[in-house]
Image (cartoon, rainbow, N blue to C red):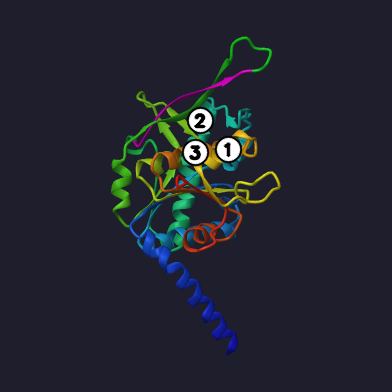
Amino acid sequence: MTLNINAAKNIASVLTEALPYIQRFTGKTIVVKYGGNAMIDEELKNSFARDIVLMKLVGMHPIVVHGGGPQIGELLKKLDIKSDFVDGMRVTDSATMDVVEMVLGGLVNKEIVSLLNRNGGKAIGITGKDGDFIRARKMKVTRKTPEMQVPEIIDIGHVGEVAGMNPDIIQMLKGSDFIPVIAPIGADESGQSYNINADIVAGKVAQMVMAEKLILLTNIAGVQDKDGKVLTGLTTTQVNALIEDGTIYGGMLPKINCALDAVNSGVTSAQIIDGRVPHAVLLEVFTDEGIGTLITNRH
């Protein structure tokens, strides 16, 4: 009996802690970039889905943007199509783009939609090509080495960046019971498909809808200082200083720049959190402690 009372007290304590956050975020939009281990591990997949469904049930407007790098790599390997990378971006020729579109727009997108539906939500999957939602343009990568007199411009194929977004679709879905699940594929004026980095798409969606939060799920605990300690509340000024002194470098830079862009463009806060932790999204949104690194424009 004592155990039951203690368990009940714990539940009451958790609900009491969550209540102010539910009140504060009701009616607000939260954009979540879903990727990494959280997309592969079965327990993490289901805990993520329940977190998103709960957010919708208590009156928030979650929008999910997903990646799918490992799944794309797996199918390319099976089809014996070689992958090359330039600055962390997959060089995408026409054959690779067909696979990217098949995996992101079909397989992965529908799996996430199904996962949310099985956990009590009502999800709908779209790509950036639906309703001309994401207008893309070709991305060119400039690379310079000490031996070069002139920087080399590298064509990495069907890799794009966001040229513009049509907000009508998201506004329509946001006002409904549906949870939008977005695959990061866009098209240019001629209808040519482009693979776009999911972090960038999530950041641009967050800016477009003036989201309360942008949450980026990663495979690390958050932004760390030079001693490996996770840095929690950071202002944009502090983040810029950490980039300047080399604390933030390499693979973390694109995520950080995406978070900075979003916050500088009116998104209230951006969080980089550890998707390897069960219910990471719930812990970030509904608890005093939160997890990972919070970035705001407040000084």
Using the image as rendered, state which of residue 167 and residue 114 is in the foreground: 167
Amino acid type, callout 1? Ala
The label shown at residue 258 is 3
Q: Tell which residue pokes out farthest to the bottom in this image.
A: 1
Write the residue at 62% across / 40% down. 74
Compared with 92, 229 (above or below) is below
Residue 210 shows up from this direction: yes
Q: For residue 165, what is the image quadrant? A: top left
Please tell me the numbered disc located at residue 179.
Answer: none
Crowd around label 2: few <14 · some 14–19 · many ≥20 (10 Å): many
Q: Residue at x 48, y 56 (%)?
A: 115
- Please give the range of residues in magenta: 133-144
Location of residue 210 with respect to 129 vertically, above or below = below
- Asked whether the beta carbons under mark 1 and mark 3 sit within 8 Å of each other, the answer is no
Amino acid type, label 3: Cys
Residue 164 in which image quadrant? top left
Estimate how packed mark 3 is, as few (under 14), some (14 to 19) or many (20 or more) residues with alpha carbons within 10 Å: many
104 sits left or right of 1 in the view: left
Instruction: Compute the Cα span from label 1 to label 3.
Output: 16 Å
User: Mark 2 is on which residue type?
Assistant: Met
Instruction: Please identify the quadrant where the N terminus is shown.
Output: bottom right
| Residue hosting label 2 | 97
Do callouts 2 and 1 mark residues in contact (Cβ within 8 Å)?
A: no
Residue 255 at least partly seen: no
Residue ID for mark 1: 241
Badge 1 or badge 3: first in the primary sequence: 1
Seen from the viewer's position, the closer of residues 288 and 64 is 288
- Residue extending farthest to the front is 299
Question: Residue 122: x, y in percent?
Answer: 38, 58
> Does residue 171 belong to the magenta stretch?
no
The first of marks 2 and 3 along the sequence is: 2
Earlier sequence position, callout 2 versus callout 1: 2
